[in-house]
Image (cartoon, helix red, strand yellow):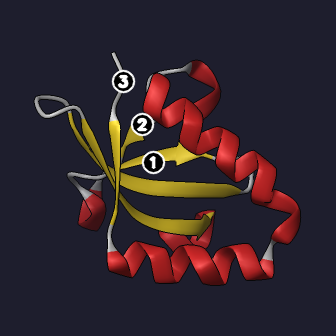
């Protein structure tokens, strides 16, 4: 079962800034997106639901320092990307 990644205009702006600041993470970021499409529950993504003001969103890890926040729609098999950045930036 594959999922469709939805890139909002806002996310694309954040993504562009992130990749400009962290070009060394480009390959790892692309691998993370591919894995999200194939299996968002893969253990290496460390997908988990967020709480507090981010209730309703999930987080997936690019590496130990950087995360992607997302909305996960299981019924529609869609993943709407919300933000990307360090732990402190996305939380």
Q: CA distance from mark 1 to mark 3?
A: 18 Å
Q: CA distance from mark 1 to mark 2?
A: 6 Å
Which of marks 3 and 2 precedes in the sequence? 3
Which residue is at 42% across, 37% downward?
48
User: Label 2 belongs to which residue?
Assistant: 48
Which of marks 3 and 1 precedes in the sequence? 3
Q: Secondary structure at mark 1?
A: strand
User: Label 3 belongs to which residue?
Assistant: 2
Residue 56: horizontal and vertical position, in percent? 20, 51
User: Label 1 belongs to which residue?
Assistant: 59
Which residue is at 29% across, 62% downward?
54
Query: Of residues 13 and 60, which is closer to you in this image?
Result: 13
Which residue is at 65% across, 26% downward?
44
Q: CA distance from mark 2 to mark 3?
A: 19 Å
Which of marks 2 and 1 precedes in the sequence? 2
Task: Answer with the quarter of the image where residue 23 lies.
Answer: bottom right
Residue 10: horizontal and vertical position, in percent? 37, 81
Q: Secondary structure at mark 3?
A: loop
């Amino acid at each position: 079962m594959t999922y469709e990644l939805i890139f909002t205009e806002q996310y694309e702006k954040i993504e562009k800034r992130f990749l400009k600041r962290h070009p060394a993470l480009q390959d790892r970021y692309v691998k993370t997106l591919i894995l999200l499409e194939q299996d968002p529950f893969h253990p290496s993504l460390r997908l988990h639901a967020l709480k507090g003001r981010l209730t309703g969103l999930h987080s997936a890890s690019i590496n130990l320092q950087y995360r992607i926040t997302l909305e996960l729609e299981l019924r529609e098999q869609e993943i709407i990307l919300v933000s990307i950045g360090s732990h402190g930036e996305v939380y």
